[in-house]
Image (cartoon, rainbow, N blue to C red):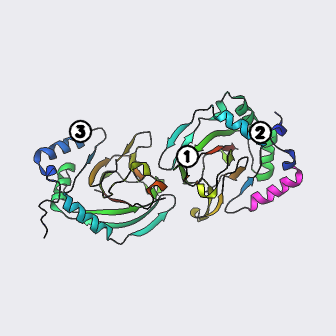
Amino acid sequence: MDRRVNDLNHGYLKEETKQKVRKSFFHSDFPAILLNDFFDQGFYTELKKKILSLNFKRDAVILHHSYAISSYKITSKEFCDFISFITKKKIDEITFSAYLLTWKDYMILNDKYLQKPGIDVIIDLTDNWNAEWGGVVTFTDGKGTVYPVTPTENSLAIVERKKNLQKYIQYINHHAKDKKRLLLIASI
Amino acid sequence: MKINNWLSPQNFSEEKIKRYQAAFSSNKPFPYLELANFIKPEKIIALLQALNEQEFSPKQADLFQFLQTSDLLYSDDPVLKEFIALFSSPELIALMHDVTNLKLNGKIDLFASIYQDTDFLLPHDDQLPGRKIAFMLYLNDLDEKDGGALAFYETKNKTPTKISKRIIPKAGTLVFFEVSPLSFHTVEEVVIDTQRITLSGWFYG
């Protein structure tokens, strides 16, 4: 019997918290927020289970990326309402690219794969990941400004990519052994 | 600058240079040459001692992670100055021209790099205006299982497809290749607690 009440951690459903998060997101030179313990634990566990059961396909374009990829649509009203509130965009559903990365995988910058300005929504589904293993989603303007998104299980990052801001995923090194980096990333 | 102070003259006889020419132009997946024992062993030791006094800074971006010096052309170290004089000398430039048939102007860049555990350089072609030949001189040995190999990619429609050549670092070996739209290469991740020490740079033309 499913006893889950909320999709999100109830703390993020409070009006006061949402206002603070939105203010923090918009009133910054670099609009970005990272919210830990974002989903209700039950929802997070179910989401992770669903993502791991997806049919991932290996995809390697040597000068841009190496990973396994699939896609997944989140239609949770609570989640979409939250994203709508923070970003001031009307969102009814978000289709994410699901990335599964292991040792030797990466996503690097390439002029042929420039990302248009937008808002990136990143859900980290990797438990107990050590940033020293690589695999960190990193934003850069190519002029020295670098914003690494700290890998944290059950976290949500929202980053506004203005002109010239691009993201990459650090090469995963051998210390990761057989561990898998699992991320959902969407641009809205 | 006496080139023979650094290099063994028997490695650069007319006959050997002809062999180098043939090997350079026929090597796959793109023109390159690997010259073992390029410099004398005592000079390797002198270079390592000189580099021990240099400052190495961490370099980290999407494409790479390693330690590197600033441009050594501005170093005051007498051994490094001598090495730079060697690589900029008319004799060595003429040798590189003879082997590669590429027109060079005598200008070089030179850096020292150290790759340690988890350091890497992902695939790229090295192309920048004026760069004609990329070179790297290995100053220590690694085993195949250590990682740190220089790997060359086959290409299809000027896009890298798969690694077809790996060069394992060996002290004193000089590797150089023509910089071109096909010269895709990588330095594979170092996977043990060691150091891969090189002097590397480009000949310009």
Q: How many numbered discs?
A: 3
**The residue tagged with tag 3: helix, strand or loop?**
loop
Q: Amino acid at mark 2?
A: Glu
At horizontal 82% and vertical 37% (from top left) the residue drawn is B5
- Asked if the stretch drawn in magenta spans residue B26, the answer is yes
Q: Which numbered disc, 2 or 1, marks the residue that appears first in the sequence? A: 2
Residue bearing the label numbered 1:
B116
- Measured from the top left, where is residue A51 in percent x and y? 30, 66
In-front residue for pair A44/B75? A44
Specify the label residue A27 is tagged with: 3
Return the x and y of residue A175 as percentages of the image width and height.
46, 54
> Which of these two is toward me, B94 or A117?
B94
Please, what is the three-letter code of the amino acid marked with disc 1?
A: Gln
- Image side of residue B50 versus residue A147, left or right: right
Q: Name the foreground residue: A116 vs A125.
A: A125
Q: Is residue B5 visible?
A: yes
Q: Label 3 vs label 1: CA separation?
A: 41 Å
Region of the chain picked out in magenta, as a range: B13-28
Real-space Cα separation, disc 3 to disc 2, in angstroms = 61 Å
Of tags 3 and 1, which is closer to the observer?
A: 1
Chain that bears disc 1: B
Pointer 2: residues within 10 angstroms few (<14), some, or many (20+)? few
- Image quarter of the C terminus of chain B: top right
Location of mark 2 (residue):
B42
Image position of B69 with respect to A117: above or below: above
Q: Is B162 included in the stretch rendered in magenta?
A: no
**Residue B138 image point, x, y percent:** 68, 47
Whether residue A164 can be seen here: no
Query: Distance of mark 2 from mark 1, alpha carbons?
Result: 24 Å
Question: Furthest-front residue in view?
Answer: B193
Image quadrant assignment for residue A91: bottom left
